[in-house]
Image: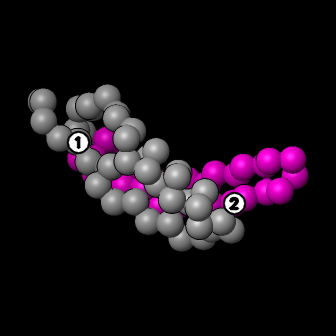
Amino acid sequence: MSDIRVIERTDPKTANAVVAAVKRWRLKPWEVTGDMPAVIGESVQFLFDQERLEKRLRMVISWERRGGS
C-alpha cells in the first residue's frame, strides 16, 4: 500500500489497528493495461459491531504495481 488515509472514524484505537493491518496487505501483481493502471485507489469502509457498540472507519487506500512484468 502506498497511501493510506483515514477520512472518518469513531474510535481512534480501532482506526490505528486497522491501518496497521492494511499496511501488511500484499496484493498479487497484475499486468498494467488501459483497464488496470499501475496505481489503483479505492475507498474502503469498515464497520465493527461489538455487541451493538458500532465503530465505523472509512479510509482511502492507494496501491501501485511494483516489480515483475
Snapshot quadrant of residue 57: bottom right
**In the rendered view, does 30 fall on the left or right side of 10?**
left
Gap in Å between the C-alphas at discs 1 and 2? 29 Å
Magenta-highlighted residues:
34-62
Q: What's the residue at 64%, 51% (across, down)?
A: 46
Q: Is residue 43 visible?
A: no
Residue type pointed to by label 2: Arg
Earlier-in-chain disc, 1 versus 2? 2
Rendering coords of residue 7 (x, y %): 54, 70
Please identify the dominant SS of the magenta region.
strand
Assess disc 1: are there few (<14), some (14-19) or many (≥20) residues with their C-alpha within 10 Å of its C-alpha: some
Assess disc 2: are there few (<14), some (14-19) or many (≥20) residues with their C-alpha within 10 Å of its C-alpha: some
Residue linked to disc 1: 65
> Which numbered dot is residue 30?
none
Query: Colour scheme of this structure image?
Result: one colour
Which quadrant: the C terminus? top left
Rendering coords of residue 50 (x, y %): 80, 47
Rendering coords of residue 8 (x, y %): 60, 70
Residue type pointed to by label 1: Arg
Give the vertical position of 5 relative to 51 (above or below).
below
Residue 5 among those drawn in magenta: no
Q: What's the residue at 29%, 55% (across, down)?
A: 2
Give the vertical position of 40 relative to 7 (above or below).
above
Q: Secondary structure at mark 1?
A: loop
Q: What's the residue at 69%, 60% (across, down)?
A: 56
Q: Nearer the viewer, residue 62 or 47?
A: 47
Residue linked to disc 2: 56
**In the rendered view, does 24 fall on the left or right side of 64?**
right
Which residue is outermost to the right?
Answer: 52
Q: Nearer the viewer, residue 39 or 54?
A: 54
Q: What's the residue at 31%, 29% (across, down)?
A: 28
